[in-house]
């Protein structure tokens, strides 16, 4: 069976691709997984259209994909928590277990982390992969492969909500109604927010956001100021938390405006270049600012919330392609259709 290979910027092919023997060999605490469903991420599309993300440059053909679920088909000699036939989802970043960051519990910021589809590490739009048991999570029967492939983006939202230290009844703003903005809004509600304002420039995206929960209010940032709207509806006080999920320096420049005194801003959107924000506005609020890099320790929580119905990601999966159509799927994803949130590819 073939793999989806990014040959170079702008050129994808579906072809046989030999994985290095070292990467394909099963260690004692590894499992071999037949891939089932893979979500297309903004980062996959960015590598396709730009050939790089910041310092990570595609220099050699690379298999794309990092949002995945699959079936365990082989287990290493010392694996105890998984068995052949288990349905699983996988955390795509593997840190060095002995690094200082990992030992301190911050494995996501381990400089040595190897993350799928981040050059030079291959992704998983391929027949099978070998993965550590410790980063592979068994799925309850009522969580589908499609939902499980949403755990990776959902983990970003849940990590952001965790960093925000939400209290029940908080009011939050999420800047940006892309896939990460929407999973952040769902995570904020699951974490206890009473109301989440989601702002974006695209009306269709705001409609999707509002359809997810009666606790979500869409705000069209091209027509009204998010700060004015939030203040008008909070007796002039502002919101407890702002989640920045656009990655736009313009949004970041005014990030404190809707925030209440003592509130928290969580920076989620990637900022490839240095940006400026209004430190004076942060100061007079004694604002707390948090930054996140991917996630840590949240995959099991995401799986539990999908299983219990605390979070429903099904409405976010707007298109599913067969593997044979994956090049076309990426072309469509690169055109960013306004009514799509998450596109997924199913492997045979
Ligand atoms: Zn992703």
Image (cartoon, rainbow, N blue to C red):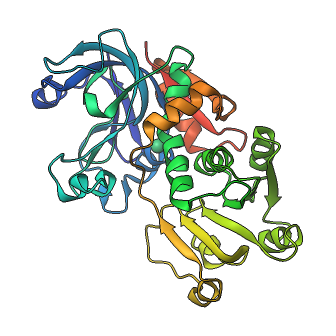
The residue shown at (27%, 25%) is 129
Q: Is residue 268 visible?
A: no
Residue in view at x 76 percent, y 42 percent: 208
Query: Could you tell whether 171 is left or right of 36 in the image?
Result: right
Please, is residue 268 above or below residue 107 in the view?
Answer: below
Observer-nearest of 228 and 81? 81
Quarter residue 255 falls in: bottom right
Q: Residue 59: give x, y in percent of width and height.
A: 24, 50
Q: Quadrant of residue 237?
A: bottom right
Give whichever of 82, 112 is nearer the camera.
Answer: 82
- Residue 266 visible? The answer is yes
Q: On the rendered image, what quadrant is the N terminus found in?
A: top left
**Quarter of the image with the C terminus in it:** top left
Taking 227 as reference, is 123 above or below it?
above
Q: Toward the viewer: 343 or 265?
A: 265
Q: Quadrant of residue 133?
A: top left
Residue 214 position in % (x across, y down): 83, 43
Q: In x, y percent, where is residue 174? A: 67, 59
Q: Residue at x 81, y 60 (%)?
A: 220
Q: Is residue 286 left or right of residue 206?
A: left
Q: Nearer the viewer, residue 278 or 337?
A: 278
């Amino acid at each position: 069976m073939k793999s989806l290979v990014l040959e170079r910027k702008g050129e994808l092919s579906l072809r046989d691709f030999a994985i290095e023997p070292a990467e394909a060999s099963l260690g004692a605490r590894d499992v071999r997984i037949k891939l089932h469903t893979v979500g297309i991420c903004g980062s996959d599309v960015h590598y396709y259209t730009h050939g790089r993300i910041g310092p990570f440059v595609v220099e050699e053909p690379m298999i794309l994909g990092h949002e995945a679920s699959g079936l365990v088909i082989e287990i290493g000699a010392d694996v105890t928590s998984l068995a052949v036939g288990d349905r699983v989802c996988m955390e795509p970043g593997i840190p060095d277990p002995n690094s200082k960051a990992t030992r301190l519990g911050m494995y996501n910021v381990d400089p040595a982390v190897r993350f799928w589809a981040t050059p030079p590490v291959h992704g998983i739009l391929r027949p099978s992969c070998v993965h550590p048991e410790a980063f592979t999570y068994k799925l309850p029967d009522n969580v589908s492969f499609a939902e499980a492939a949403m755990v990776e983006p959902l983990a970003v939202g849940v990590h952001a909500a965790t960093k925000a230290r939400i209290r029940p009844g908080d009011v939050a703003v999420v800047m940006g109604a892309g896939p990460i903005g929407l999973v952040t809004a769902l995570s904020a509600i699951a974490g206890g927010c009473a109301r989440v304002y989601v702002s974006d420039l695209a009306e269709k995206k705001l409609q999707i956001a509002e359809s997810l929960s009666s606790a979500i209010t869409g705000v069209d940032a091209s027509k009204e100021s998010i700060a004015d709207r939030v203040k008008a509806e909070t007796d002039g006080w502002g919101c407890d938390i702002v989640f920045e999920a656009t990655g736009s320096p313009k949004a970041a420049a005014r990030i404190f405006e809707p925030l209440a005194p003592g509130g928290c801003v969580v920076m989620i959107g990637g900022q490839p270049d240095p940006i400026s924000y209004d430190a004076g506005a942060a100061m007079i609020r004694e604002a707390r600012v948090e930054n996140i890099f991917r996630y840590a320790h949240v995959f099991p929580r995401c799986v539990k919330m999908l299983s219990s119905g605390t979070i429903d990601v099904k409405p976010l999966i707007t298109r599913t392609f067969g593997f044979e159509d994956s090049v076309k799927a990426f072309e469509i994803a690169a055109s960013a259709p306004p009514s799509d949130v998450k596109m997924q590819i199913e492997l045979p």
